[in-house]
Amino acid sequence: MSRYFSVAMAGGLAAVLLVSGAAVAQKAHVLATVNDAKWGPAPPLVPPGAQIAVLSGDPMKAVPYTVRFKFPANYVIPAHSHPADENVAITSGEFFMGMGDKVDKTHATSLPVGGYALMPAGMNHFAFTKGEVTLLLYGTGPVDFKYVNPADDPRNHK
């Protein structure tokens, strides 16, 4: 049976697993090809322009989750941290990540397809792209971003 995921954005990111039109708890396996992704705008936790497809779980709850993110060329995520560990696996393109309190493109690590990063809870880091990038992001929720500079937080730009 195919499972499709949608993202609701009322007040932030809330993932809802839909099976035959009814919301249910995630208890079965998930088999999803890249072409099965149901893309939608990323939540306001990240700068505008990114897209998200929720594969499993609910990133806003204290449960395991997996999402795909698609970032356009020349996309920048300013320095931030998360309350829980964040796992990143690159599936297309080249993603750049670095540690620190501000974006420093000269001190970033290039992660090509197959690259992996683990950002421990509370570690300040930043990311950017040169071309389009798709990645898997997974961990245990709830997902949140704490930007080092509050002026960089897209939720403050309403």
Image (cartoon, rainbow, N blue to C red):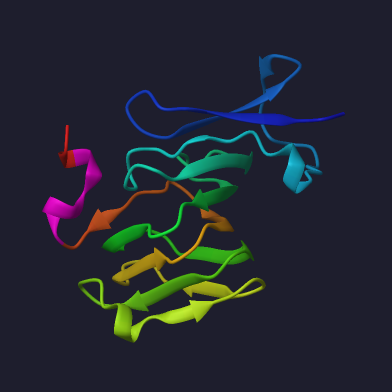
The residue at 44%/66% (across/down) is: 130
- Membership of 54 in magenta stretch: no
The residue at 79%/46% (across/down) is: 33
Residue 97 image position (x, y, % from top left): 41, 73
Q: Can you say whether 82 is above or below 18 in the image?
A: below
- Membership of 152 in magenta stretch: yes
- Camera-side residue of 150 and 106: 106
In the picture, measured across the screen, residue 153 lies left or right of residue 44, that is left
Residue 157 in which image quadrant: top left
Residue 1 image position (x, y, % from top left): 87, 29
The residue at 34%/48% (across/down) is: 46
Range of residues picked out in magenta: 149-155
The residue at 79%/37% (across/down) is: 28
Residue 69 image position (x, y, % from top left): 53, 50
Residue 12 image position (x, y, % from top left): 35, 33
The answer to whether residue 82 is seen in the rendering is: no
Q: Can you say whether 31 is above or below 127 in the image?
A: above
Farthest right residue in view:
1
Farthest top residue in view:
21
